[in-house]
Image (cartoon, rainbow, N blue to C red):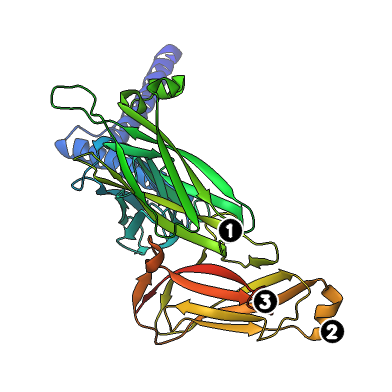
Amino acid sequence: MRAIVATVLCGVLLGVGLGVGIGKFKSNYRFWTPQMEVNSTVKAATAAVANAASTADACVDCQRGPRVEVVETSFDFGILEKNAANEKGEHPFKIKNVGDETLTLANGGKGCFCTDFEISHKSLRPGETATVLFKWDAARSGGVFNQGVRVLTNDPQTPEVDFAVRGLYTAPIVCEPNEISFQNASATTETTRSFRLFGFEHNDDGTPFPLEILGVEVADSARLEFQIEKADLAELTDKERSHNLFSNTTNLFKGVATLKPGTPQGAFQEIVRVRTNSPKTPVLEIVVGGQVAGNTVRLSGRRYDDKGTGYLTLDSVSSRETTEEKLRLTIFDKIPTNAETVRVKSVRPAWLEVEFAYPPEELQKSAAPVRMVDATVRVPAGSPQGAFMGPSKEQLGEIVFAVGETPETTQEIVLPVRFAVGP
């Protein structure tokens, strides 16, 4: 009897346990339906979007503020035969704002008067792109061309971006160097510079063209003298013989340019015309320029290039407001500094203004024998719009200072001024 009761009791307990287990299983188990798979896909997609958003947020965190992205900063136009059709060119560069704040762009200058550039948009919202159109004019260049421009930005990591264009112009005649420079030449002694002319022409049958120099035209022969003579091709160096341009030389000339004593102090520029028997280049123009240093007067100033061109560069100014720039004339002489001894002989254009400030005589005596005069160069408001940027001397602004007590001792200082007046 006891065995029967125990067996029944075990059966009851086992049934209760099995029932509870089956109930538990039923409460957790759901039969598969298509909606279950859709829900699973949605959940996976939602998780992927969340992960992508998280990644994007992390990327944005890396690009806070205005940020510059530039893929290309230089362009090589290769080898071009120099002629009127291709001596001018242009190439677009791109700047993109990959930051999350507005990116601003500004003109940071250029390396040569033969180049210019335009910025399509000066302000870029996040994701926007601007075009920097680089333009060049190689009318007076031959051989290697390598010039650059600069764009300024408000990106603290990339405050400036330099773009460069390079290439090689072949021409019937090339002057090397392509501009003869007399930097820091003396006003009292003779200064010379050497140069060479390379000819590359051939006759129709492929033989070298017999190039001849027929004459040289110098605007101011009393100040500048040119001598050119035929040279032997054997004088080419090994490096020149391996050069992809100079290795094709068919005629070689060597020359000497002489700057004579008495040239006014300051910057100067001349265009020398070399006449030849070449049907392709009957006249070769050579730029001759530089800066003549005097023994008694030195110019200095924030925007005065005393180590290079000798120009005062104001860049772009507005006709709506007055623009001023200060210079200092340091005079290494004992002459008194006043309106009679330090003066302006001429200005170009005529509305360009110059105002002197003369330190007190007591201060001048304490600094003797050095004398100082401050000059303010002014483009007044209301000035007519126009460009005075060169390249020729007549296309630049100009101030001619005169320093001295008598006509015999007066020294002239020529100061070219580069600027453009806009609205």
Label 2 CA crowd tier, 10 Å (few <14, some 14–19, many 20+): few
Does label 3 or label 1 sit earlier along the sequence? Answer: 1
Q: Is residue 377 above or below residue 194?
A: below
Q: Position of residue 168 (x, y in %)?
A: 32, 36
Q: Residues within 10 Å of mark 3 (few under 14, many from 20)?
A: some
Q: Is residue 33 left or right of 23 when viewed as pictured?
A: left
Give how far apart the Cα atoms at labels 1 and 2 are. 31 Å
The image quadrant that residue 389 belongs to is bottom left
Q: Is residue 274 above or below residue 359?
A: above
Q: Which amino acid does the dot numbered 3 rest on?
A: Gly
The front one of 83 and 152 is 83
Q: CA distance from mark 3 to mark 1?
A: 18 Å
Work out whether mark 2 precedes mark 3 in sequence or the reverse, and give the earlier one: 2
Q: Earlier in the sequence, mark 1 or mark 2?
A: 1
Reading the image, the residue beneath label 1 is 292
Determine the CA span between mark 2 and mark 3: 20 Å
Q: Which residue is mark 2?
A: 362
Instruction: Pick the quarter of the image with the C terminus.
Output: bottom left
Q: What's the residue type where badge 2 is placed?
A: Glu
Residue matched to label 3? 404
* Element carrying mark 2: helix
Q: Amino acid at mark 1?
A: Val
Image quadrant occupied by the N terminus: top left
